Image (cartoon, rainbow, N blue to C red):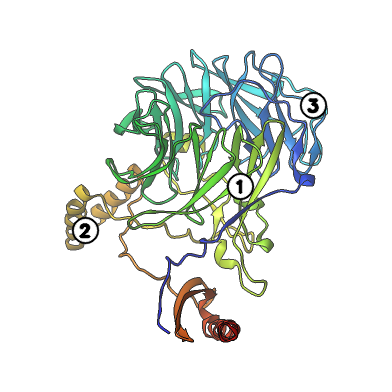
């Protein structure tokens, strides 16, 4: 029998999504009837989740993840706004700090460390005494996002056609960037040095938050419902999801160094719900969850054409009003869980786990590279003065700070930059002076880190430490009683156990053929 590649090799090809058991969901949710269409509606960290609550003004509830089951019918809330909450976002560095964006044109940063812990809900209502107000917007504030590396830096967008950067530690505005139209979505890049915005004018912009300038802009999706943006980790890629002019939902991948020429455009379906992108840089998996959908699709992102591979989708029982991705540190490594989401479905919140099927005797360490540690690398003033830093990482296996950052996925230089990159490299090789080194260091701080191109390979490199799954097919031909039998045997095994598994499956095939031969002879 001949052997050939059947599909692309990937250890994430068979990722499965599974909803939590009824005992592990959170019930009796009574949410606010209004929320921003571009907001996740629900927010979470490793200890709590938060959701806007129904009531006068702008209340919201923070609930411990450890307290499963039904919430109190009238729970204690955080109340400080005079209009409904539009967005909530937990600080990536402090478990008990959260920012709220409201229709009252303000933001509030709350610190509830002295009011509650992760073992029991809030005992009584908390007023604005445990928060500081960020004032400057003149209309509804729709979104708020924390910088991933700098302490206390918050990005917000509003219907007043501005995006503002705040120093939450000083309750002061640092920068205001005026846009031609209302921003619909905002997203930081991997090291918090740039952010992307999409607006009602259907333009995607990459902005420098410290200079206040717009570095690049391009027409985004052609549909009228807007688009959401997401930087894909340390790679140079930027994803936008939205609607085409024909109203079908689509995803576009671009090189963030030159966003004028899309790398790939992938059509999804013709549903009408807004899609929210969530990227996991540890596995290079992009998750798409839509408001009003029952499912969460997920794709693997690679560095070569076609750049995106559909893996599968999780399908829930009820439609979702909001979705958030939890920190990687909460996953159950013993059960090969690689990600966990929270789905808000009308009256309950449901955890959804994504796992990689593995044999019990197989090592799982290759699924857990160093991940985001949730520790600030820069102070607010350092970042505002121009300093850059990559996010701090933690070793998932040992729990210790990672000594080395994981390598970024690779991507070819943009076509118009290839000649310039080659010329610059030759110049630096000829003049390896101190001035050139200082220039290279300055450029690395001014823009996202450049990445090297690696040629496309059709197989995954074999690792002596951790076996990688591969899929192989056998074409089987046999003639019995003048009847030609054809079939394809597909085997998914690990490289170090391949021969043993192949021999076992071949014996099974021979047994099945013997039974079929007996039936044909009987006829």
What residue would you read off at disc 3?
75
What residue would you read off at disc 2?
425
Q: Residue at x 32, y 56 (%)?
A: 305
Residue occupying the far front of the picture:
523
Q: Do we see residue 175 in this rendering?
A: no
Which quadrant of the structure image shows residue 369?
Answer: bottom right
Q: Which of the numbered marks, if any, corresponds to residue 327?
A: 1
Q: Quick one: label 2 or label 3, which is nearer the N terminus?
A: 3
Q: Are marks 2 and 3 in contact (CB under 8 Å)?
A: no
- Badge 2, how many Cα within 10 Å: few under 14, some, many 20+? few
Q: Residue at x 32, y 63 (%)?
A: 454
Q: Residue at x 67, y 71 (%)?
A: 360
Relative depth, front residue between 373 and 442: 373
Q: Residue at x 50, y 37 (%)?
A: 276
Q: Which element carries disc 2, helix, strand or loop?
A: helix
Examine the rendered structure and indicate whether residue 113 appears above or below residue 419: above
Q: Which element carries disc 3, helix, strand or loop?
A: loop
Tell me where residue 437 appears, x and y as whole percent: 28, 55
- Per the model, the C-alpha gap separating discs 1 and 3 is 25 Å
Q: Are marks 1 and 3 in contact (CB under 8 Å)?
A: no
- Badge 1, how many Cα within 10 Å: few under 14, some, many 20+? many
Q: Quick one: label 1 or label 3, which is nearer the N terminus?
A: 3
Which quadrant of the structure image shows residue 2?
Answer: bottom left
**In this rendering, position of residue 492 left or right of residue 28:** left
Tell me where residue 423 appears, x and y as whole percent: 16, 55
Relative depth, front residue between 328 and 99: 328
Q: Quadrant of the C terminus?
A: bottom right
Q: Which element carries disc 1, helix, strand or loop?
A: loop
- Per the model, the C-alpha gap separating discs 2 and 1 is 39 Å
Q: Are marks 2 and 1 in contact (CB under 8 Å)?
A: no
């Amino acid at each position: 029998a001949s052997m050939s590649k059947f599909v692309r090799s990937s250890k994430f090809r068979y990722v499965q999504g599974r909803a939590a058991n009824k005992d592990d969901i959170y019930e009796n949710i009574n949410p606010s009837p209004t929320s921003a269409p571009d907001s996740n509606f629900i927010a979470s960290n490793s200890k709590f989740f938060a959701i806007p609550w129904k009531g006068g003004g702008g209340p919201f509830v923070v609930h411990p993840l450890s307290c499963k089951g039904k919430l109190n019918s009238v729970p204690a809330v955080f109340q400080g706004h005079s209009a409904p909450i539009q967005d909530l976002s937990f600080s990536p560095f402090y478990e008990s700090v959260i920012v709220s964006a409201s229709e009252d044109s303000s933001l509030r940063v709350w610190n509830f460390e002295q009011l509650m812990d992760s073992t029991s809900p809030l005992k009584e209502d908390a007023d604005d005494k445990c928060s500081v107000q960020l004032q400057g917007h003149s209309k509804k504030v729709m979104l708020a996002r924390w910088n991933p590396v700098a302490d206390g830096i918050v990005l917000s967008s509003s219907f007043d056609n501005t995006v503002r950067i705040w120093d939450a530690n000083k309750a002061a505005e640092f920068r205001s960037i005026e846009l031609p139209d209302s921003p619909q979505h905002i997203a930081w890049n991997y090291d918090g040095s740039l952010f992307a915005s999409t607006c009602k004018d259907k333009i995607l912009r990459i902005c420098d938050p410290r200079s206040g300038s717009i570095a690049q802009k391009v027409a985004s999706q052609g549909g009228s419902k807007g688009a959401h943006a997401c930087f894909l980790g340390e790679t140079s890629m930027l994803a936008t999801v939205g609607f085409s002019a024909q109203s079908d939902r689509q995803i576009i991948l671009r090189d963030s160094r030159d966003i004028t020429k899309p790398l790939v455009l992938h059509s999804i379906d013709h549903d009408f719900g807004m899609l929210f992108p969530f990227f996991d840089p540890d596995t290079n998996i992009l998750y798409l969850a839509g408001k009003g959908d029952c499912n969460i699709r997920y794709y693997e992102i690679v560095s070569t054409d076609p750049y995106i591979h559909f893996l599968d989708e999780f399908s829930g029982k009820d439609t979702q009003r909001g979705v958030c991705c939890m920190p990687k540190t909460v996953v159950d490594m013993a059960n090969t869980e690689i990600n966990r989401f929270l789905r808000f479905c009308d009256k309950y919140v449901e955890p959804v786990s994504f796992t990689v099927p593995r044999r019990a005797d197989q090592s799982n360490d290759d699924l857990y590279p160093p991940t985001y540690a949730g520790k600030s690398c820069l102070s607010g003033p350092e970042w505002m003065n121009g300093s850059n830093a990559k996010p701090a990482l933690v070793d998932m296996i040992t729990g210790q700070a990672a000594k080395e950052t994981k390598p970024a996925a690779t991507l070819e230089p943009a076509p118009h930059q290839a000649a310039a990159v080659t010329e610059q490299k030759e110049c630096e090789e000829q003049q390896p002076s101190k001035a050139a080194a200082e220039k290279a260091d300055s450029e690395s701080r001014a823009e996202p880190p450049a990445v090297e191109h690696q040629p496309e390979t059709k197989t995954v490199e074999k690792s002596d430490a951790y076996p990688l799954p591969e899929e192989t097919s056998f074409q089987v031909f046999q003639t019995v009683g003048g009847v030609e039998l054809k079939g394809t045997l597909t085997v998914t095994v690990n490289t170090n156990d391949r021969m043993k598994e192949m021999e076992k499956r071949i014996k099974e095939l021979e047994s099945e053929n013997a039974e079929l031969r007996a039936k044909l002879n009987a006829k």
